Image (cartoon, rainbow, N blue to C red):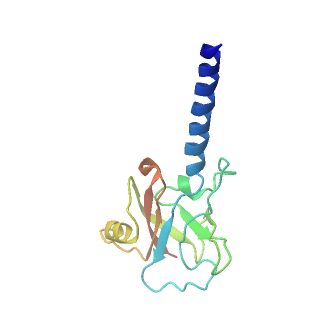
Amino acid sequence: MIAVLAVVLLVVAVGGAFWLLRGQDDDPAPVAAPTGSAVAGEPSADADAPAPSAAAPESSADPRFVKVGQCIRNDGVPGGKPKLLISGCAPKSYEVLSRIDGATSGERDAKAKCDKVEGYTDWFSFDSELDTLDFVLCLKQR
């Protein structure tokens, strides 16, 4: 009886730990700020962080999957939570000049990485609990 109880407690503890760890990924700490002359009040003016989501991306427009040469736009409410989406390269969109995958430590780190990229006007930094998911995008407003 004690062995069965021990196995049940072990299964519950492992399941609870998995649930807690998985839940931490749902609320990453994104950091972003415009550099240059972008105006924060315009809907597509600054490249801010995507809204965290507990589910898998709904489409291939998720900015976590953007590649160099593609463009993104901000569909979020000005002054509110931004919503970045991969889009066509139209006026007021942002072209990805460089994508730097790997650990990032916030604004200074992201800016320092993009300072090495010629022609960038803005940057976007995604900083999650798991450093392997972090990335910095060096962007040029079109």
Expressed as whole percent of the image width and height from the top left, the position of residue 10 reads 58, 26
Q: Which residue is rendered at x = 60% and y = 48% of the image?
A: 23
Please, is residue 49 above or below residue 7 in the view? below
Label count reads: 0
Expressed as whole percent of the image width and height from the top left, the position of residue 128 reads 49, 55
Is residue 67 visible in the rendered image? The answer is yes
Nearer to us in this view, 29 or 14: 14
Quadrant showing the N terminus? top right
Is residue 25 visible in the rendered image? The answer is no
Nearer to us in this view, 129 or 18: 18
Please, is residue 22 above or below residue 138 in the view? above
Q: Which residue is rendered at x = 66% and y = 72% of the image?
A: 76
Q: Which residue is rendered at x = 57% and y = 73% of the image?
A: 93
Q: Which residue is rendered at x = 60% and y = 77% of the image?
A: 44
Q: Is residue 65 left or right of residue 75?
A: left
Q: Is residue 96 left or right of residue 8?
A: left
Expressed as whole percent of the image width and height from the top left, the position of residue 17 reads 56, 38
- Quarter of image, res 43: bottom right
Please, is residue 136 above or below residue 76 in the view? above
Q: Residue furthest front?
A: 2
Expressed as whole percent of the image width and height from the top left, the position of residue 68 reads 46, 58
Nearer to us in this view, 123 or 8: 8
Please, is residue 49 above or below residue 43 in the view? above
